[in-house]
Amino acid sequence: MKAAVSAVVRGTDGDRRCFWADGDPLYERYHDTEWGFPVADDGRLFEKICLEGFQAGLSWLTILRKREAFREAFEGFDFERVARFGARQVQALLKNEGIVRHRGKIESAVNNARRALELAEEQGSLAAWFWGFEP
């Protein structure tokens, strides 16, 4: 019989973390400062939505490693700016080796920016819409 894997491990720095965050500084920093923390900033929420979409089928570590390039490519995840992206910007993003170059995911991020803009206009902010579902 195999021993069960512990869900919590102690890192080399002595801090306790979820097992998946152990061993890579990017994962550790993400775990310790972001994962599971509530977010009420519209830009950060939009970034999370986009990065989750780009992550589909890939590891989260891949996305974390490309995060700064994503931030640059998507105008700091300012959804008002991304909502104005057109075919020319999509083509440029498809050539950007720093990000995940998947047409469907890029076009989805642009569409999500347009929807986020609509929600922010209707609800006062994107965060107000998200947090409206809190029990």
Image (cartoon, rainbow, N blue to C red):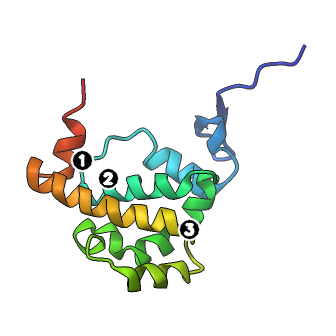
Which residue corresponds to mark 3? 102
Neighbor class of circle 1 (other Cα within 10 Å; few <14, some 14-19, many 20+) is some
Residue 69, compared with residue 109, is above or below; it is: below
Residue occupying image coordinates x 63% and y 47%: 13
Q: Disc 1 vs disc 2: which is toward the camera?
A: 2
**Is disc 2 placed on a helix, strand or loop?**
helix
Q: Quadrant of the N terminus?
A: top right
Residue occupying image coordinates x 33% and y 58%: 112
Q: Quadrant of the C terminus?
A: top left
Q: Disc 3 vs disc 2: which is toward the camera?
A: 3
Neighbor class of circle 3 (other Cα within 10 Å; few <14, some 14-19, many 20+) is few
Q: Give the CA separation, mark 3 to mark 1.
A: 28 Å
Q: Nearer the N terminus, badge 3 or badge 2?
A: 2
Residue 57, compared with residue 38, is above or below; it is: below
Res 40 label: 1
Q: Disc 3 vs disc 1: which is toward the camera?
A: 3
Residue 91, compared with residue 63, is above or below; it is: below
